[in-house]
Amino acid sequence: MIERMTREDQEKLKKKLEALKKKRPIISKAIGEARDHGDLKENSAYHAAKEEQGLNEMMIRDLEAKLDSAMIVAKAELSGGGGVSLGSIVRLKALDNGQEFEYTLVSEMDADVLENKISPQSPIGGAIIKQKKGAVVEVEVPRGLVKYKILEIK
Protein backbone atom coordinates (compact mmCIF):
# COMPACT_ATOMS: atom_id res chain seq x y z
CA MET A 1 0.00 0.00 0.00
CA ILE A 2 1.32 3.44 -0.91
CA GLU A 3 1.76 5.70 2.08
CA ARG A 4 1.10 9.35 1.21
CA MET A 5 3.07 11.76 3.37
CA THR A 6 4.61 15.17 3.35
CA ARG A 7 8.37 15.70 3.37
CA GLU A 8 8.08 16.68 7.06
CA ASP A 9 6.30 13.40 7.85
CA GLN A 10 9.03 11.48 6.04
CA GLU A 11 11.71 13.21 8.11
CA LYS A 12 9.83 12.40 11.35
CA LEU A 13 9.66 8.75 10.31
CA LYS A 14 13.37 8.65 9.51
CA LYS A 15 14.25 10.10 12.93
CA LYS A 16 11.94 7.63 14.66
CA LEU A 17 13.51 4.74 12.70
CA GLU A 18 17.00 5.93 13.59
CA ALA A 19 16.08 6.06 17.29
CA LEU A 20 14.66 2.53 17.16
CA LYS A 21 17.80 1.20 15.47
CA LYS A 22 19.94 2.86 18.17
CA LYS A 23 17.98 0.88 20.80
CA ARG A 24 19.14 -2.45 19.31
CA PRO A 25 22.50 -2.66 21.12
CA ILE A 26 20.93 -1.48 24.39
CA ILE A 27 18.29 -4.22 24.19
CA SER A 28 20.90 -6.82 23.23
CA LYS A 29 22.99 -5.83 26.23
CA ALA A 30 19.94 -6.18 28.50
CA ILE A 31 19.27 -9.65 27.08
CA GLY A 32 22.89 -10.65 27.68
CA GLU A 33 22.86 -9.38 31.26
CA ALA A 34 19.55 -11.11 31.99
CA ARG A 35 20.86 -14.36 30.46
CA ASP A 36 23.80 -14.24 32.87
CA HIS A 37 21.39 -14.41 35.82
CA GLY A 38 20.78 -18.11 35.27
CA ASP A 39 17.73 -20.24 34.47
CA LEU A 40 15.95 -18.70 31.46
CA LYS A 41 12.63 -20.44 32.15
CA GLU A 42 11.91 -18.32 35.22
CA ASN A 43 13.96 -15.26 34.30
CA SER A 44 11.42 -12.42 33.92
CA ALA A 45 14.10 -9.85 33.04
CA TYR A 46 15.24 -12.03 30.12
CA HIS A 47 11.69 -12.54 28.84
CA ALA A 48 10.88 -8.83 29.15
CA ALA A 49 14.03 -7.89 27.23
CA LYS A 50 13.26 -10.45 24.51
CA GLU A 51 9.72 -9.09 24.22
CA GLU A 52 11.06 -5.53 23.97
CA GLN A 53 13.44 -6.69 21.27
CA GLY A 54 10.59 -8.25 19.29
CA LEU A 55 8.45 -5.12 19.53
CA ASN A 56 11.37 -2.91 18.55
CA GLU A 57 12.13 -5.03 15.49
CA MET A 58 8.45 -5.05 14.51
CA MET A 59 8.32 -1.24 14.66
CA ILE A 60 11.53 -1.01 12.63
CA ARG A 61 10.08 -3.26 9.90
CA ASP A 62 6.84 -1.26 9.90
CA LEU A 63 8.61 2.09 9.55
CA GLU A 64 10.94 0.75 6.85
CA ALA A 65 7.94 -0.53 4.89
CA LYS A 66 6.19 2.85 5.20
CA LEU A 67 9.30 4.68 4.03
CA ASP A 68 9.82 2.26 1.15
CA SER A 69 6.27 2.76 -0.09
CA ALA A 70 6.13 6.49 0.64
CA MET A 71 4.77 8.88 -1.92
CA ILE A 72 5.87 12.38 -1.00
CA VAL A 73 3.18 14.96 -1.61
CA ALA A 74 3.04 18.67 -1.01
CA LYS A 75 0.19 20.14 1.01
CA ALA A 76 -0.80 22.16 -2.06
CA GLU A 77 -1.22 18.95 -4.11
CA LEU A 78 -3.70 17.58 -1.62
CA SER A 79 -5.67 20.73 -1.11
CA GLY A 80 -7.35 20.81 -4.49
CA GLY A 81 -7.36 24.62 -4.55
CA GLY A 82 -7.93 25.75 -0.98
CA GLY A 83 -9.83 22.75 0.33
CA VAL A 84 -9.04 20.38 3.17
CA SER A 85 -5.49 19.01 3.02
CA LEU A 86 -2.92 17.42 5.33
CA GLY A 87 -2.37 19.77 8.23
CA SER A 88 -5.82 21.36 7.95
CA ILE A 89 -7.87 21.83 11.09
CA VAL A 90 -11.49 21.24 10.13
CA ARG A 91 -14.61 22.04 12.12
CA LEU A 92 -17.57 19.83 11.17
CA LYS A 93 -21.22 19.76 12.15
CA ALA A 94 -23.20 16.53 12.15
CA LEU A 95 -26.46 17.45 10.42
CA ASP A 96 -28.49 14.75 12.18
CA ASN A 97 -27.90 16.01 15.73
CA GLY A 98 -26.09 19.37 15.39
CA GLN A 99 -23.00 18.14 17.26
CA GLU A 100 -19.77 19.86 16.22
CA PHE A 101 -16.35 18.26 15.92
CA GLU A 102 -12.89 19.61 15.18
CA TYR A 103 -10.27 17.38 13.56
CA THR A 104 -6.75 17.87 12.30
CA LEU A 105 -6.04 15.96 9.10
CA VAL A 106 -2.68 14.22 9.42
CA SER A 107 -0.82 11.36 7.76
CA GLU A 108 -1.83 7.85 8.77
CA MET A 109 1.22 7.45 11.00
CA ASP A 110 0.32 10.56 13.02
CA ALA A 111 -3.39 9.76 13.35
CA ASP A 112 -4.69 9.57 16.92
CA VAL A 113 -8.43 9.76 17.40
CA LEU A 114 -7.96 10.59 21.09
CA GLU A 115 -6.20 13.80 20.01
CA ASN A 116 -8.74 14.44 17.21
CA LYS A 117 -6.09 13.74 14.57
CA ILE A 118 -7.46 11.74 11.64
CA SER A 119 -5.94 10.57 8.38
CA PRO A 120 -7.35 10.57 4.84
CA GLN A 121 -7.59 6.77 5.22
CA SER A 122 -10.25 7.15 7.94
CA PRO A 123 -13.91 7.39 6.90
CA ILE A 124 -14.29 11.04 7.89
CA GLY A 125 -10.81 12.03 6.67
CA GLY A 126 -11.42 10.40 3.29
CA ALA A 127 -14.74 12.18 2.91
CA ILE A 128 -13.44 15.67 3.73
CA ILE A 129 -10.09 15.64 1.88
CA LYS A 130 -10.05 18.29 -0.87
CA GLN A 131 -13.52 19.53 0.16
CA LYS A 132 -14.16 23.23 0.68
CA LYS A 133 -15.88 25.20 3.44
CA GLY A 134 -19.65 24.74 3.27
CA ALA A 135 -19.51 21.32 1.60
CA VAL A 136 -21.76 18.56 2.92
CA VAL A 137 -20.25 15.07 2.96
CA GLU A 138 -21.76 11.68 3.78
CA VAL A 139 -19.74 9.36 5.96
CA GLU A 140 -20.39 5.76 6.97
CA VAL A 141 -19.52 5.68 10.68
CA PRO A 142 -20.28 3.03 13.33
CA ARG A 143 -23.64 4.63 14.10
CA GLY A 144 -24.63 4.62 10.41
CA LEU A 145 -24.59 7.08 7.51
CA VAL A 146 -24.06 10.63 8.78
CA LYS A 147 -23.97 13.91 6.85
CA TYR A 148 -21.42 16.48 7.99
CA LYS A 149 -21.16 20.10 6.95
CA ILE A 150 -17.69 21.66 6.82
CA LEU A 151 -18.01 24.83 8.90
CA GLU A 152 -14.41 25.98 8.92
CA ILE A 153 -10.99 25.07 7.52
CA LYS A 154 -7.87 26.47 9.21
Image: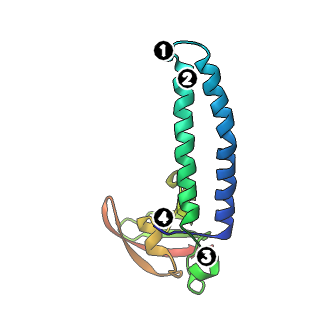
Q: Residue furthest left?
A: 144
Instruction: Please tell me in which quadrant of the rendered image residue 67 appears.
Output: bottom right
Instruction: Kindly report the distance in space between the C-alpha atoms of the residues bearing marks 1 and 2.
Output: 9 Å
Element on which disc 2 rests: helix
Q: What kind of residue is marked 3?
A: Val
Q: Amino acid at mark 1?
A: Glu
Label 2 or label 4, whichever comes before in sequence order: 2
Inspect the image, locate mark 4, and give the three-letter code of the amino acid beneath it.
Answer: Glu
> Distance between the Cα atoms at labels 2 and 4?
49 Å
Earlier in the chain: of badge 2 and badge 3, it is: 2
Q: Badge 4: how crowded within 10 Å, few (<14), some, or many (20+)?
A: some
Residue 149 in view (yes/no):
no
Residue positioned 63% across, 24% down in the render: 32
Q: Which mark is residue 46?
A: 2
Where residue 68 sits, quadrant-wise, is bottom right
The quadrant of the image that shows the C terminus is bottom right
Q: Is residue 67 above or below residue 58?
A: below
In this image, 134 relative to 81: left or right?
Answer: left
Residue for badge 3: 73
Between 108 and 70, the one lying in front of the other is: 70
Q: Position of residue 115 (x, y in %)?
A: 56, 53
Mark identifier at residue 42: 1
Q: Of tags 3 and 1, which is closer to the observer?
A: 1
Q: Which residue is labeled 4 in the image?
A: 100
At a point 70% along the width and 54% down the height, the residue shown is 15
The residue located at (65%, 64%) in the rendering is: 10
